[in-house]
Amino acid sequence: MAIFTQQKMSKMPAGKLYMIPSALSEHSVYTPGRHELEVIHSLRLFLAERAKTARHYITTTLPPYKQQEIDVLELPKHGDDGTVKDFIKKIQSGENGGFLSEAGCPGIADPGAEVVSQAYSAGIEVVPLVGPSSILLALMASGMSGQHFCFKGYLPQDKTKLAQVLVSMEAESARTDSTQIWIETPYRNNAMREVCLKTLKAGTRFCIAANLTGPQERIFSAKIKNWQPTKLGDLQKTPAIFLMYAGSEPTRQ
């Protein structure tokens, strides 16, 4: 009679969550490095802000698989319908997964932070990959303080409230010697520029970096007194980063 020894099944180790940067614009000069490509091409499970955009970006990397062979989950626009939990459970079961932002580095000014938080709660290792960050690229080209800076996200739409917030940020910049960085919905970029030029002090440095890494990239940084209302042209529908610096800069004019 055969004797069977029952062995305790070892639990499969959890997979990893890769934070995958994507291009900042449709015709961006950015291309993923060899390591990033290897990771993207090794994955079959993805979570993205928009599945259509993610699939398009993955296709541009010339993956060794067909689109129907990968699973791209889409984040719900309002609340969590269980998509993130399902994604995390699949990684817990041993499958590696990747999170893609709509543009640029995931987890910065997008819902990626919540995904990462849930991954850590589930004991999953998180691996950030190298890629373009419009916020850091703008800071690099601004000539402003890179030692102390603060990202404010979106500012109020109402022009009166916006002006009040800008004055407060300008005072914070002067007090802490820091660069203040923020973004706006592209179709309100022109209005944002107008309010900034009317509100900020003449000696405050102001920068707009538009369509970064794209074929129509435009960057200008100068003190308010040297700005012109039409500088950089029409910014409507163009992704842009706004920066100001009211700190001490004794060597600058």
Image: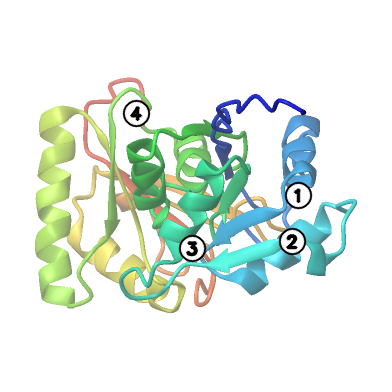
The Cα atoms of the two marked residues, 3 and 1, are separated by 24 Å
Q: Is residue 37 above or below residue 86?
A: above
**Residue 106 % position (x, y):** 50, 48
Give residue 18's mark.
none
The amino acid pointed to by label 4 is Ser
SS of the residue at dot 1? loop
Give the labeled residue for mark 2. Answer: 70
Horizontal side of residue 47 vs 88, given as left or right: right
Q: Nearer the viewer, mark 3 or mark 4?
A: 4
User: Which residue corresponds to the image point at 18% horizontal and 38% vertical from the top-left?
Assistant: 173
Give the labeled residue for mark 4. Answer: 145
* Mark sitting earlier along the chain (3/1): 1
Give the labeled residue for mark 3. Answer: 231
SS of the residue at dot 4? loop
SS of the residue at dot 3? loop
Give the labeled residue for mark 1. Answer: 29
